[in-house]
Image: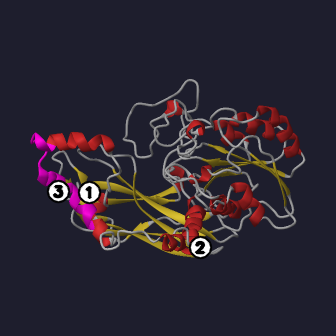
Amino acid sequence: GLDMHMHGPRFLKPLLKLVETGRISEARINAAVKPILIAKFRLGLFENAQVDAAAASSVVFNPQHKQTALELARQGIVLLKNDGLLPLVTGQKIFVTGPNANNHTTMGDWVFKQPEQNITTVVEGLKSVAKPSTSIDYLDVGSQVKKLDPTLFVEAAERAKAADVAIVVVGGNALRYDRKGKTAGENVARSTINLYGDQLALVQAIHASGTPTVVVLVNSRPLAEPWLVENVDALIEAWEPGALGGQALAEIVFGEVNPSGKLPITIPRSVGHLQAIYNYKPSTYARRYIDAPTNNLFEFGDGLSYTQFTYSQPTVSASRIAENESTRLSVTVTNSGDRDGDEVVQLYIRDNFSRVTRPLKELKGFQRIHLKAKQSQKITFDITPDTLAYYDLNMEWRVEPGDFTLMVGSSSRNSDLKKVTITVEL
């Protein structure tokens, strides 16, 4: 990939001095500049240096771009918990609140302030996707995660009690142009990774009403809030799903889209549980906490669906191979539920014994597949020397002889993986 240099006023004069004093050669500068200039040539910026504003308005945020943004949000939103509440049935009264329910935090960092008509907020999405027999009651308790109005929490609980379902949209704010309201994004560090400020108190007040509660997280950094996982009926990780994120989220809530996103990170229980990664190395040391459970809230690759997928025992075309040979893993995935859906089939490997300590598991491939209810599909992964190789003690890329465990399933959690062993022979 090409890394285009951003504006850097503090770099230019010192860099010039380094060239003048011979610390950096002009050839090195040319080598850095060349790929940027080539990219600009390919874009036609030298032939057409002036921007046609009218043409830009027809290209930027055009229907194709909107469709892409919508599809990305549909596939990226992750259903983390669902005690049978989702998808919602039609004809219900739904109470919606929370600081991120009706603002632009779905856009995230590094975004210019957008016209209102460009953004579908969560509330707008719910209202547009809901059937006429479903009513949406929205209460604004403050649209900044830092500035909630706790005096409204009693009213929020009362209005939740009068509804069939409550949806509370909380999380973070990474908007660049909201400097005072930011809790995430570039140059915004935090000492903890739980919900900021009064947000958990808001959720707890609504949960205490007895009304089934869905919590939606709109955030960029992982949020660790065990109380949510243990208490609310459904939990959705929406990330910062973009301009049409509100629509995609509503489609998932009402079951028009079956959620299929998977976590690209591990979600720990607290900041004290960091570093939480799936590909850690084996150790005889048992990590224990005296004041909290040891397990993560959610594992790398986690993500639920409104249907269920079952995996057959995987097989390999050859269980014994030479260092330069390949084998093929096959597994049959079945949609054993009653709803069509997408599954992201994940392949992990472990080099069981090696001269340099290797991780307990490493993601080596994945495939997104669509299966109709009760449909099965055979999935294959080619296990090549590159799949099994690593940089050894001499920093040489090679496959060491020995046993490798191949694991395939719906997440990195051991209980979600089916295993088969292959042997690389001397």
**Amino acid type indicated by mark 3:** Asn
Magenta stretch secondary structure, dominant: helix
Q: Secondary structure at mark 1?
A: loop
Q: CA distance from mark 2 to mark 1?
A: 33 Å
Asked if the residues shown at circle 3 and circle 2 are in contact, with their CB atoms under 8 angstroms apart, the answer is no
- Residue occupied by mark 1: 389
**Front: mark 3 or 1:** 3
Q: Position of residue 321 (x, y in %)?
A: 26, 65
N-terminal label among 3 and 1? 3
**Amino acid type indicated by mark 1:** Ala
**Amino acid type indicated by mark 2:** Leu
N-terminal label among 3 and 2? 3
Q: Is residue 332 left or right of residue 127?
A: left
Q: Secondary structure at mark 3?
A: helix
Q: Position of residue 258 (x, y in %)?
A: 65, 65
Asked if residue 41 can be seen in this view, the reply is: yes
- Residue occupied by mark 3: 30
On-image quarter of the N terminus: bottom left
- Residue occupied by mark 2: 371
**Which range of residues does the magenta coloring cover?**
19-38
Q: Position of residue 360 (x, y in %)?
A: 39, 46
Q: Residue at x 71, y 51 (%)?
A: 102
N-terminal label among 2 and 1? 2
